[in-house]
Image (cartoon, helix red, strand yellow):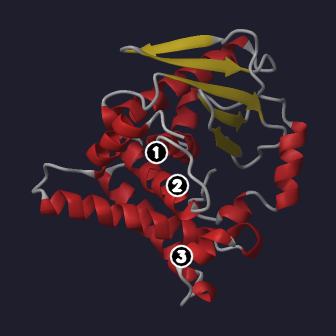
Amino acid sequence: MRADRSRGWAQARRSGLAVAALIMTALSVAPAAAPNATLLRDDRQLRLFISPEFTAEQRLQLTAWIDFIAETLAQVYGHWPRRQWEIAIAPAAAAEHDLIPWGQVKRDTVDRVEFYTAPRASAEELKREWTGYHELAHLLIPYQGWGDAWFSEGLASYYQNILQGRAGILTEQETWQKLFDGFSRGQAETRFDGQDLASVSKAMRYRGGFMRVYWSGAWYFLSIDMRLRRQSRGKLTLDKALQKLNSCCADEQ
């Protein structure tokens, strides 16, 4: 799921009830009989399902956006993490201040990313939204895993900024500033001081602490990336470590 860049995870969704209302009122993103488009990269395939509620022009804009962010994901390994995967997009019922108010990843035989987007949004506007990069970054881990949200959400929170920087959406200075701001929000949740991250992560859904969990995880991955680069004198990076994990274990449950 997405993490917030400035207001906090819970505030971005207003409340659990607001999220439920959004999901209930948005069009289902259940796959159609055939994809609207199939994007190919080397021997890998991305099937794109776009709700018929969008106009023809809106579907073109959405396809251009997905093509762009999917390419940024491919740059991490030099290819997409899975040989076949899917993205489905439905219009958001209420997206006044957020062009992508909801996104999620569903793990199965074929991994699937679902987005709810504002119909009015152009490809260029969507490219500047961090949510797409965050959700796709989840796929860098070859399997979902259970119980440690700090790990998967931390990875996605770290890479949402790294991918934007590599794609030219953020400057180098902006990338570091986004990371710094996120770490500051996590540190600001002082009521969790003295508690181990695993415990805070496990109780996050009903006790809160999203910023502490997401950005502590992101700090972990930044630290690992820096250590790998330093100890190997630049020969090994987090990208390469994750690629090796994906190569060995992508088909394991």
Which residue: 74% across, 76% down?
Answer: 207
Instruction: Give the image quarter of residue 14.
Output: bottom right
Please name the amino acid that badge 2 sits on. Answer: Ser
Give the residue furthest to the bottom: 194
Residue 197: give its label.
3
Q: Earlier in the sequence, mark 1 or mark 3?
A: 1
Helix, strand, or loop for circle 1? loop
Residue 150 image offset from top left, x and y in percent: 54, 64
Q: Amino acid at mark 1?
A: Ile
The quarter of the picture where residue 190 lies is bottom right
Element assignment for label 3 = helix
Q: Position of residue 201 (x, y in %)?
A: 61, 70
Q: Nearer the viewer, residue 240 or 187?
A: 240
Count the numbered circles shown.
3
For residue 114, above or below residue 57: below
Look at the image and tell me whether residue 119 can be seen.
no
Please give the residue where the numbered disc 2 appears in the rendered image.
152
Looking at the image, is mark 1 or mark 2 earlier in the sequence? 1
**Which residue carries the number 1 mark?**
141
For marks 2 and 3, give the CA distance: 13 Å
Mark 3, Cα crowd under 10 Å, few <14 / some 14-19 / many 20+, is: some
Q: Quadrant of the C terminus?
A: top right
- Label 2: state its secondary structure: helix
Residue at 70 percent of width and 73 percent of height = 208
Does label 2 or label 3 sit earlier along the sequence? 2
